[in-house]
Image (cartoon, rainbow, N blue to C red):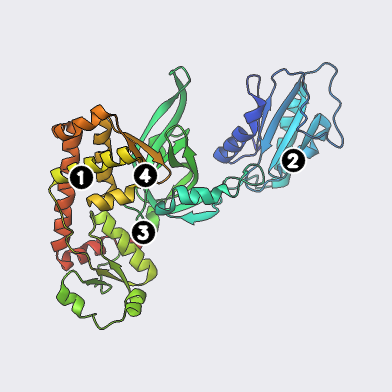
Amino acid sequence: MSTTGVLVLAGSQWPAGVLGLVAGLIAQEYGRPTVLLSTEATDSPDSKIPKSPNPGTPIPNSQIARGSARSVNNIDLYGLVKERADLLHRFGGHPLAAGLALPVENIPLFAEGINRQLREQLGASGSLGVPVVTADLAVTVAELGQPLFRELKLLEPCGTGNPVPKLLVQNCWFEKVWHRNIEDSKGRKVQYIKTEFEIRDQSSVSGFAGVWWGHYKEELPPGRCDAIVELDYNTFKQRYEVRLIAVRSCVENFQFRAPVQLDWIVDWRCEKMKAKDALMSEEEISSSFIVLQECPRSWDELQVWFRRAAHRQQKLALAWALPPMQPAAQVWQQLAGVAKYLSRTGALVTRRQLCDKLGVSDGCLQLGLQALGELGFQVTHFCDSLWLSVPKKASRRVAVAESSPAIIEFLAAVSEEQFIRQYFAEVPLSTILAMANLGRDYLP
């Protein structure tokens, strides 16, 4: 690696169809133009590679290697390949990518010649520069998901000349990080690692699933980071996720900020406090305030609203009231009744509608759906909607199954969530201001 500017590698077991993809990954990983050649014997000509203007004369009965090349750092790879046309049978491409075919006997001469040509271009410095990954769009974690995925699909087909859009997520961090060996079709582990994680930032109260191929979890920097990802849909796990392309620590970008008096958070939970602004018109309120009417379920959720108000340069009005709450057991009976009704009628329902009906969060609803699943209900997802079906035997078990561990977990989650809402209905404004000061990295 210390003496090679262009990586030229050949293998007899490499399928030619994936060489372009792999060459691009290697070039990006090591910051060097990469040429991968397959020496697998074949009688069919490579019709995808146009004939060169000055094709080399292959040795009679010689074996032809075919492959792909990918460049980095704006190095004109096609120009380098063209300079060695006397050694090639066919070639074609553009500055960032090329396809080529040459006699196997010429591979060493080709590798030496293309590296010498690159050294001459780089001059005395001989430096290839720092590998650069360019992002197409800056996004937050809250913006990742189906709507953005559908918009990006409009840019397809993606490939050489139209790469997959790369998304920049700034000031993020990683949670639930772990790695494992990949298994083949027979369940045997192979020597290839992938790291799975959830990417988080202050735009969302929950993380977004992701994967980093070929890397161990220890390679992820701790603390806040800037990450470049690609948004994808995992058909096996039936979920949207990101593929991590590049990541760097941004801890050094953070500086200590002394606490300040926050005058942009007002308390309308008490009618007396709201009366101070009662003379304002609805237009004035909408232009000056973000009115938070739904009781938060965690400090992380409240921090999202702090960030939104700071970004829009509006005051945040805390206007939530303690919502009506019913015992957790009644919430379960209501969920079971709704499930049986939906199963009987075949109607669809969204998760948001179920959450509003039961007065619970999406996470709490998920525990309820899992409990229904253990009782025999089948939950089918259609985009943003749910369809529930259940055999008759299972529907009779619902009323007598409150001792089920899954239902007990759901009841505990409902009770905990109600306790938190009770807390946020009564927590002093001074405590909220103190928590806002602790998260001041979102302020302009």
The amino acid marked with disc number 4 is Leu
Labelled pair 1, 4 in contact (Cβ < 8 Å)? no
Q: Which residue is mark 3?
A: 254
Discs 2/1, front: 1
Mark 2 or mark 4, which has the lower sequence index?
A: 2
Q: Quadrant of the C terminus?
A: bottom left
Mark 1 or mark 4, which has the lower sequence index?
A: 1
Q: Which mark is residue 93?
A: 2
Q: Secondary structure at mark 2?
A: strand
The amino acid marked with disc number 2 is Gly
Q: Nearer the viewer, residue 52 or 187?
A: 187
Q: Is residue 95 above or below residue 292?
A: above
Mark 3 or mark 2, which has the lower sequence index?
A: 2
Q: Which residue is mark 1?
A: 334
Q: Secondary structure at mark 1?
A: helix
Discs 2/4, front: 4
